[in-house]
Image (cartoon, rainbow, N blue to C red):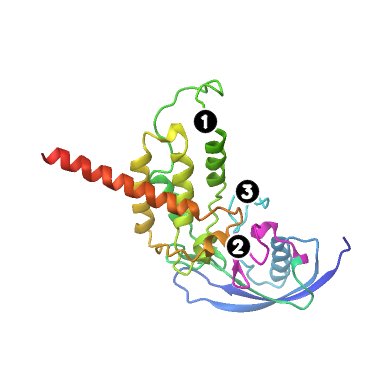
Amino acid sequence: MSEELLNLTLHVWRQNGPNDSGRFETHQAKDITTHMSFLEMLDVVNEELIENGKLPIAFDHDCREGICGTCGMVINGMAHGPQKLTTTCQLHMRQFKDGDEIWLEPWRAQGFPVLKDLVVDRTAFDRIIQAGGYISIRTGSASEANELPVAKEIADQAMDAAECIGCGACVAACPNASASLFTAAKISHLSLLPQGQAERQDRARTMVAQMDAEGFGGCTNHGECEAACPKGVSMRWIARMNRELVRAMVKADTTIERRDR
């Protein structure tokens, strides 16, 4: 593939901190090669800003391999940009044309307060996991692989749910800023496995309760979460989470009723 040079106009959200009102700033990205990733393009822009004595654009990144879920921004109104099933760090500049104007914004949600520029506080996701997205039952040392049989269909489903990397694109894309897809994926992949059965119902109750407490909106089945997810996590996990929650609440009510007798 031949290498082309692009000259782009960036309209970037700049915000000094959570209490700043924020504003868009216009920057020029010059002589950008189509082989660059989107984050490499921002690196070039930042180098020029630093050389001119200006503050660089703050953005999140880590592995730059589409695995960690750290990178994330709204590019031209789309979470992670125009290419489906792609994180921001995997987006390449060949998706754009010379002379394009690109608008960059942070994830916008009550549960994701802006820290600086394109960086948001996503520790709400950590607190949802801490509420029950783990197995605390002691399982002992590693056992022989086939000692605890798991049907391939179930294992495949669990892996599909576990693909969620917690980037937050689902929240950013949802008109309600709902975290249902993220929470549902984390609940579902554990509820499918034998090791997750002991805490299955408590997990559904506590994680959904924490999700609500963080200020995320409710799911009304717009489907934008699935469309924006860079790993293609399906909305069907939200339906499964709702069923898990109903079962857990019914059992809790039944247990209380028995105690009252």
Q: Position of residue 222 (x, y in %)?
A: 49, 66
Residue 67 sits above or below residue 29 on the image: above
Give me the C-alpha separation between circle 1 and circle 3. 26 Å
**Residue that protrudes farthest toward the right in the picture:** 2
Residue 190 sits above or below residue 114 on the image: above
- Specify the label residue 59 is tagged with: 2
Q: Does the segment drawn in magenta span residue 258? A: no
Is there a contact, CB below 8 Å, between mark 1 and mark 2?
no
Say whether disc 1 or disc 2 marks the residue closer to the N-terminus: 2
SS under mark 2: loop
Say whether disc 2 or disc 3 marks the residue closer to the N-terminus: 2
What residue is shown with label 1?
Answer: 150
Give me the C-alpha separation between circle 2 and circle 3. 17 Å
* Amino acid type of the residue tagged 3 in the rendering: Ile
Q: Nearer the viewer, residue 93 or 253?
A: 253
SS under mark 1: loop
Q: Position of residue 113 (x, y in %)?
A: 46, 65
How many other residues sit within 10 Å of disc 2, few (<14), some (14-19) or many (≥20)?
some
* Amino acid type of the residue tagged 1 in the rendering: Val
Q: Nearer the viewer, mark 2 or mark 3?
A: 3
Write the residue at 55% across / 23% down.
146
Say whether disc 1 or disc 3 marks the residue closer to the N-terminus: 3
* Image-based side of 61 in relation to 234, left or right: right
What residue is shown with label 3?
Answer: 67
Magenta-colored span:
72-94
Write the residue at 55% across / 67% down.
106
